[in-house]
Amino acid sequence: MGMASFPIVGRGRRAVKTSFPLILSRQPADARTRLRKQSDVYRCFSNSHDGNVDYQIQMRNATSPLWRISYKMQLAIKYLHMKSVLQKLTNTLIELEAINGSLHTFVKTDLLNGLCCHLSQVIPSPQEEGYRNKSDLSVGVGEDGNIKTVGMFVGNWKRKNVVCVPADTCLNISHRHIYIGKLYQEFIRQCSLDVMRDFYGDGHLGGCAVRTNVAGNTMAIAQLNPKGLNTFQLNAYKEDLKNFFLKFNPGSLSSLYLQCSSKTKTYDDDSIELLFGEQYIHEKLHDLTFRISPLAFFQPNTKCAEVLYSTIQELAIANSEKEILLLDLYCGTGTIGLYLSKSVQKVIGIEIVPQAVQDAIVNSSINGITNAEFLCGSVEKVLPQILASLQPNQQVVAVVDPSRNGLHANVVKSLRNCESVSKLIYVSCKPDGNSFKDFIKLCQPEGEGTASRKAWYPINAVPVDMFPQTLHCELVIEFKRK
């Protein structure tokens, strides 16, 4: 017996038919509960539709708050912010050292304009707008009241004034991502399923993540909550989604994934299924090629990532006369370690996410790199084992690029205690957050807190503007022993 086909909401050139039957409407009790919860969802947006509000301006203010000023002035503002972070670090170290009878940092400030280390000017991004290679688009109530609007949330949930605004004028997002978002919105408005809400755990339609590479290949990951759907319904939805992009919008995507999860955000690889196209996206950084899985982390600004990695390489390898063992901690898909592999004797990367480690191993093979090894596990457990097995007089340089949570206390302790690690490069996307606490722990005098061996001291700090139009900026700090 063939699959039944049912008409959809919406008309027009791209209107398609869906094989998804409105089974829920045949269950009055469930339907009443669903409608009540949906009305609660609407109340979160009930105060939003003010005709005097320019939601595109609000969206720009939220996603690219520096859009009104020139890029030159943006860099100047970020430089001042990085300087304030280092000034706070300087003052803290002076106080901690003074208590222990040391004036090391205080004396350095005379030569470094009052700071504990040299601060470079902010290195600009080669691309100022439309630079994001990945965009996470949400679904919610739009300015016109349509709950199936794809874009960015603007407003405050507690104040119940949230609106989902199309990303048409968002300066960070490429036109390609905006176009795919519009297509996805067109599809879900033709679908009979409800929108998923994380604070209720019901509904089905979630957001859509879009990834692109410099070559123009485009991957989309549509999100769906499968709760309450039987196999027939789930397969019908997959077929409709695939046909919408493959048949009615051919060439719009290189690959399409469906992520089935009751969570609004998950990095579980078992939750995704390839509906059509290439399994991975590949990106080039200088002469290296990197395989990127659908859920893998990759620096969001590809062109500036090359600048960032070149900066790390310059700081890590400068003035080295010995063969270096490079420890790439929190290595992700191995981009930093592989980028520096030609300049060192060996690379050992540590990452807790299995798929990221697999990508790193594949990336090593793709590029013919034979001196890199990648280990799966938590850095705080694996690092002490590696440090304990080092050869005498082995020169070790460690690069840490942790999440915003910063370093685990045991990682700080291991880096303090192993004097074979002669240089430390810390890459932080939020240096005034948890990373700042790490800076203090790494540099505080011996015997203070978790410190037991020789302290680290900041030598150079280089800001790299990975996020133009925003207040955020990467900070790369080179630490050495006293």
Image (spheres, rainbow, N blue to C red):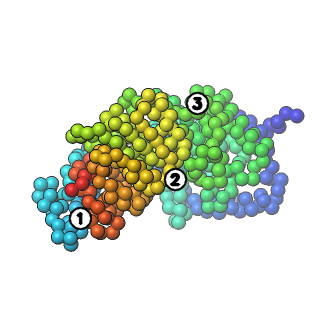
Name which quarter of the figure residue 88 lies in.
Answer: bottom left
Residue 283 pos. (x, y %): 45, 32
> Rounded to the nearest whole Å, what is the CA distance between mark 1 and mark 2?
41 Å
Q: Residue furthest right?
A: 1
N-terminal of the pair, mark 3 or mark 2, is 2
Q: Nearer the viewer, mark 3 or mark 2?
A: 3
Crowd class of label 1 (few under 14; some 14 to 19; many from 20; radius 10 Å): many
> Rounded to the nearest whole Å, what is the CA distance between mark 3 and mark 2?
30 Å
Q: Which residue is mark 3?
A: 278
Residue 336 pos. (x, y %): 38, 40
Crowd class of label 2 (few under 14; some 14 to 19; many from 20; radius 10 Å): many
Q: Nearer the viewer, mark 1 or mark 3?
A: 1
36 w.r.t. 24: above or below: below
Q: Residue furthest bottom?
A: 99
Name which quarter of the figure residue 94 lies in.
Answer: bottom left
Residue 128 as seen in the image, left or right of residue 202: left
Mark 1 and mark 2 residues within 8 Å of each other at the beta carbon: no
Residue 220 as seen in the image, left or right of residue 457: right
**What is the number of the mark on residue 153?**
2
Q: Amino acid at mark 1?
A: Leu
User: Looking at the image, which residue is at 59% across and 37% down?
Assistant: 183
User: Looking at the image, which residue is at 50% across and 61% down?
Assistant: 156
N-terminal of the pair, mark 1 or mark 2, is 1
Can you see residue 463? no
User: Looking at the image, which residue is at 64% across and 36% down?
Assistant: 274
Q: Nearer the viewer, mark 1 or mark 2?
A: 1
**What is the number of the mark on residue 93?**
1
User: Looking at the image, which residue is at 50% across and 34% down?
Assistant: 362
> Rounded to the nearest whole Å, what is the CA distance between mark 1 and mark 3?
51 Å
In this rendered view, identify the residue nearer to me: 162 or 274: 274
Residue 155 pos. (x, y %): 49, 58
